[in-house]
Image: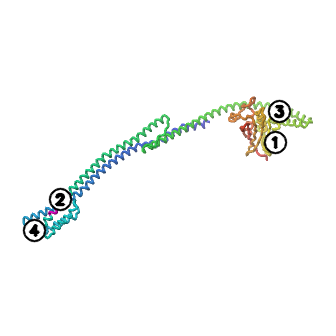
Amino acid sequence: MSDDIIPIAHMAAAEPREAATRPAASQRSVLDDVLSGPIQLLAVVGGLALLVALGLLVTVSWRGLQRLEPFYVHLEQQERLQQIERRIDNILALHAVKGSDPSSSDMDLLKVQLTQLIGAHVFSDPTSAERLREAIKSLNSSRAAAENAEDARARISQVLDHEKTAGRSELSGIRHGARAELMLAAVALLVLPCTALLVMIILRDHITRPLRDLSRLLNLIGEAQYRPAPAGDVAVTVRPIMEGYNRLVDRLTKALQTNKRYQDQLQAQVQAAAETLVRQRVEIAEADRLSAVGEMSARVAHELRNPLAGIKIALANLTQDSVDDDQRERLQLIAAEVDRMARLLDHLLVRARRQPEAPTEVDVRALVSDLLALARYQVPDRIALDNSTPAGVVCRLQRDGVRQMLLNLVLNASQAIGESPGTISVTACRENQMLRLSVVDDGPGFSKDLIEGGVRPFLTQRAGGSGLGLSTVQRMVQAMGGKLELSNREPRGAVVTLSVVSSEAP
């Protein structure tokens, strides 16, 4: 019994510890992931804000350079025009001092320089190129060179005025664009930190609130109250720890249920062991009492054998002297019963020496018919006796032992029916190597305690009964390697079934 109890107790104690420690490592990894997640997210948000701000500054600087680059080119073009204008001024001043016309080489050089400026296509005013072409035409005119130079200088002066006006307009656009981009950068630098701060506040609320709830639930675990945490409406970063907590609660609940089940099983086993011990003690006491009764029975059987031998001789003499056939038949029946009593006494002595009866070939239906004919003289006429055994069933079994058991069962059924009319039936069937004999009555049936608790010596439900009839039958059938079964039938009545080892007659 202790071999069955100790493993269960060990399992009952070990299971909660295993259930509680199994998720420890996984819970630590989940906690590390959850706690490092917000830090990484905030670092990513801050880094993105910084990168965006730097990107805006780089973009503003790059766009400023892109806008200033054409302006510088236009300034260089204006300087070259101013140089051409000064050269024309020098040529006209020399003409005024010396009175000679400008040389053709100077005029050709002016035309080449103007042609190069037109080919560069970098004017602020779109009409400048056309005006310079007109200046070149003026230099090619057939008029006097001085007049041509004066006309070209006037046109170049107009181009410079228009370029300066367009340059001022372009510079104003650059100034306005730079101011707008500066405002955009300032707004971005103001909005991005505020956005990052707002994200931090939202994340803190989404993270700290579930963690506070989790802390409260963990305190409830300390009080042996296991409640799952709501994992559906929490932040994604906190959801793994909530799911891990729910798995922990589920495992703890299952571990406690398993522990309680093992404790219940252990308690049931301890109770069953105690009941078995008490029952064994009672059975040992009853076995001692039955042993004394058996010893006394053996002595009585030894003492009764001689008187029975005298009775048998007297019955034989009476049978020979009788002239009435009916009376002679009854005397022969009595003599047969005396012989059976002698065999039973011999069996008592043999059982005391632990030598079982040898099996013989028996016609089961004939055995039951003889038995019921004998029982008819001891059973009241209001109780019918029915032989429902099939014909032709011949087995090798212990004849007298089976006959004695069936007679005891029939007489017990008659006593159970009492003063009421009723019927006692005997049935038989073969199942493999077993012969099943059933005695069925329509009496009050067996009590629930007798069916569930089994047959025990000196236990009876009939007033005045000894409680040895069924126990004797049970002991005899067990000695034959069989078993005794008790049951009730509907609407009333009892069924006693004997299963004895038998073999078919050759």
Q: Answer with left or right where residue 488 lies relative to residue 73.
A: right
In this view of the protein, which residue sits in the foreground, 56 or 329? 56
Q: Earlier along the polypeptide chain: callout 3 or callout 2? A: 2
**Residue 24 in view:** no
Dot 2 falls on a residue whose secondary structure is: helix
Check disc 4: other Cα within 10 Å, few if <14, some if 14-19, many if 20+.
Answer: some
Taking the spot 25% from the left edge, 52% from the top edge, the residue there is 176
Q: Nearer the viewer, mark 4 or mark 3?
A: 4
Residue type, label 3:
Arg
**Residue 190 position by quadrant:** top left
Q: Answer with left or right where residue 307 lies relative to residue 200.
A: right
- Quick check: 54 above or below 136? above
Tag 4 near tag 3, CB within 8 Å = no
Magenta stretch in the rendered image: 153-165
Q: Nearer the viewer, mark 4 or mark 2?
A: 2
Q: Which residue is mark 1?
A: 366
C-alpha separation, residue under disc 3 versus residue under disc 2: 165 Å
Q: Earlier along the polypeptide chain: callout 4 or callout 1? A: 4
**Residue 289 position by quadrant:** top right
Tag 3 near tag 2, CB within 8 Å = no
Q: Colour mode? A: rainbow
C-alpha separation, residue under disc 2 versus residue under disc 1: 152 Å
- Residue 484 place in picture, x, y as percent: 72, 38
Taking the spot 80% from the left edge, 35% from the top edge, the residue there is 382
Mark linked to residue 305: 3
Q: Which residue is mark 4?
A: 101
Mark linked to residue 161: 2
Check disc 1: other Cα within 10 Å, few if <14, some if 14-19, many if 20+.
Answer: some
Tag 3 near tag 1, CB within 8 Å = no
